């Protein structure tokens, strides 16, 4: 009977960690998606200085997220977003039109990451 209780405890702990991880990834990705949408709106208005500040904030948010996510999420999903994140500030500072394309690509990848970490019956079974 003790083994059954220990096994149930371990399964409950793993389930709790899984739920926490899923919520944390979803909340963090949603926060970065809102920031990226704000950058896109500023890009449309031509607010270059504000774009640079927001791009730095987005890069900082990504670095903070990635530090912990690398332990919890498959690293292959993070590499491409990491590459894009490292270019955004430079492109924003130089006023390059590529910043809009990179922000759009980052939004798409963050959305895919968020969706892949959401526990749905199809992804669990």
Image (cartoon, grey):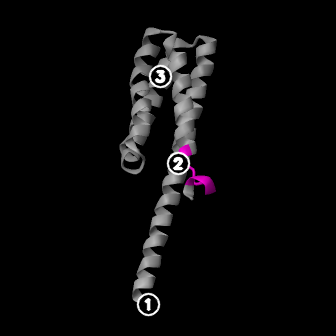
Q: Position of residue 13 (x, y in %)?
A: 45, 69
Depicted 23 relative to depicted 114: above or below:
below
Q: What is the crowding at mark 1: few (fewer than 14 residues within 10 Å), some, or many (at least 20)?
A: few
Q: Which residue is mark 1?
A: 1
Question: Which residue is rendered at x = 41% and y = 80% of the image?
Answer: 6
Which callout, 3 or 2, points to the residue nearer the camera? Answer: 2
Q: Nearer the viewer, residue 15 or 27?
A: 15
Q: Name which of mark 3 and mark 1 comes first in the sequence.
A: 1
Q: Position of residue 88 (x, y in %)?
A: 44, 21
Distance from label 3 to label 2 (Cα)? 29 Å
Tell me if I can see residue 14 in this picture. yes
Label number found at residue 75: none
| The N terminus - image quarter | bottom left
* Residue 44 inside the magenta-drawn segment: no
In the image, which residues are magenta? 116-123
Q: Position of residue 71 (x, y in %)?
A: 36, 49
Distance from label 3 to label 1 (Cα)? 59 Å
Q: What is the crowding at mark 3: few (fewer than 14 residues within 10 Å), some, or many (at least 20)?
A: some
Question: Which residue is rendered at x = 53% and y = 59% of the image?
Answer: 19
Q: Nearer the viewer, residue 67 or 121?
A: 121
Question: Which residue is rendered at x = 41% and y = 51% of the image?
Answer: 72
| The C terminus - image quarter | bottom right
Q: Position of residue 69 (x, y in %)?
A: 41, 45
Q: What is the crowding at mark 2: few (fewer than 14 residues within 10 Å), some, or many (at least 20)?
A: some
Q: Which residue is mark 2?
A: 117
Q: Which residue is mark 3?
A: 53
Label 3 residue SS: helix
Which callout, 3 or 1, points to the residue nearer the camera? Answer: 1
The reply to whether the C-beta atoms of the residues labelled 3 and 2 are less than 8 Å apart is no
Depicted 8 relative to depicted 31: above or below:
below
Label 2 residue SS: loop
Distance from label 2 to label 1 (Cα)? 34 Å
């Amino acid at each position: 009977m003790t083994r059954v209780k220990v096994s149930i405890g371990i399964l409950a702990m793993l389930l709790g960690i899984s739920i926490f991880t899923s919520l944390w990834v979803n909340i963090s990705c949603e926060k970065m998606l809102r920031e990226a949408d704000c950058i896109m709106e500023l890009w449309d208005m031509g607010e270059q200085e504000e774009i640079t500040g927001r791009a730095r904030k987005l890069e900082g948010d990504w670095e903070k997220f990635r530090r912990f996510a690398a332990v919890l999420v498959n690293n292959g999903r993070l590499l491409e977003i990491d590459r894009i994140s490292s270019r955004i500030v430079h492109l924003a500072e130089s006023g390059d039109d590529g910043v809009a394309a990179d922000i759009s690509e980052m939004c798409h990848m963050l959305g895919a990451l968020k969706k892949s970490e959401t526990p749905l019956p199809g992804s669990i079974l």
